[in-house]
Image (cartoon, rainbow, N blue to C red):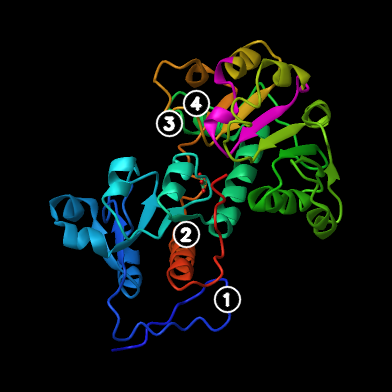
Amino acid sequence: MPTSQVKLFRKMLPGWELDMGGKELPGVLIFEIGGAAGILESHVEFLKTHFNLITMKEFQKSKEELHEKIKSIFVFDGRPLIDRQLLESLPNLKVVGNSGVGVNHLDLKLISSFGAKITNTPHAVSDSTADIGMALMLASARRLVEGCHIAMSPQTKHFAVDWLGVEVTRATLGIIGMGSIGYKVAKRAKAFDMNILYHNRNRRKEEEERLVGATYCKSIEELLQQSDFVMLVVSLTSETYKLIGKRELELMKPTAILINICRGAVVDQDALGEALQNGIIKAAALDVTDPEPLPRDHQLLQLKNVIITPHIGTATVQALRMMTEETVENTLAVLNDLPIPSEVNPN
Ligand SMILES: O=C(O)C(=O)CO
């Protein structure tokens, strides 16, 4: 039997050359291969060197014998849905590996009550999601989408715009949430000579030093009042649900732009629509909404000062590859009793 080598993209756990020789590969339940919420076909060969992949279709047709082989579930784009019934049918489940950083679609307490660990992939997603944050900020500031429509419209005879954008250079960016994505946003914003404010539950002195300047705002209010751009990069929890509502929007500058790259429900979207129509803030750029997609008659879709992208924070070849690798790392760590690179605390 060949030795299966764990390829670590971060090379952070030394000595990870697990000898799988002679052992049966652990069963992993996946939603499907291919399709919108399926494992990418190009990742299957790599995954099969470590695991016995079982799709939901195979699982549903199978007998208990197969259920007993399943040690892990890989969740991609929220699927498969993990409910009590599924958990009860997997007596040897040890880990649920979520591809992506946000775990608001998982019932963490329920999963951990079945003795399974939960992992996510904060490292894999941070660059691509920070890039989308920068792309949305620049696109909104320079009115890229409106410009693109004018340049491509069959009605356009000559280029003349009756509006001006604003520059991000030397402007103040307020980042709400200084986790791995927030930090990467700040790093990029530094290259634009932006003045960086951030709010986080805990002050992140190490990140401040690494960035050579980022000012901690203990209160969100202070950050909202001072920022030209406000970027949301928090996890969705009961504490951050509708964190940005009417009151918070009214604290922002009338010239400010709101960028959301975390979860739609962090913003009160009705309040946002009103604020955008009434000049309370200038514009919004959203990679996430609640729900996704928004109903076609939603007020946010009618406004010229809004850009919406279809939750593409991690939609790159590189990010998906790294998410798969980070999930493999996490899963193998749990199954081999090694330190878990990215474990989610169910509390
Ligand atoms: O990693 C996640 O949870 C994302 O939604 C990235 O956009």
Mark 3 Cα-neighbour bin, 10 Å: few <14, some 14–19, many ≥20: few
Comparing marks 4 and 2, which lies closer to the viewer?
A: 2
Instruction: Pick whichever of labels 2 and 3 is earlier in the sequence.
Output: 3
In the rendered image, the vertical position of residue 11 relative to residue 138, given as above or below: below
Residue at the spot 54% in from the left edge and 84% down from the top edge: 15
- Identify the residue position indicated by label 3 in the image: 292
Query: Disc 4 residue type?
Result: Thr
Q: Nearer the viewer, residue 250 or 235?
A: 235
Tell me where residue 195 appears, x and y as whole percent: 83, 43
Q: Which residues are magenta?
A: 252-270
Query: Disc 2 residue type?
Result: Met
Spatial distance from mark 4 to mark 2, Cα to Cα? 43 Å
- Identify the residue position indicated by label 4 in the image: 156
Query: Disc 1 residue type?
Result: Leu
Is-magenta flag for residue 46?
no
Residue 323's tag is: 2
Residue 11 horizontal side relative to residue 110, left or right: right
Residue at the spot 53% in from the left edge and 34% down from the top edge: 148
Instruction: Pick whichever of labels 4 and 3 is earlier in the sequence.
Output: 4
Q: Is residue 56 visible?
A: yes
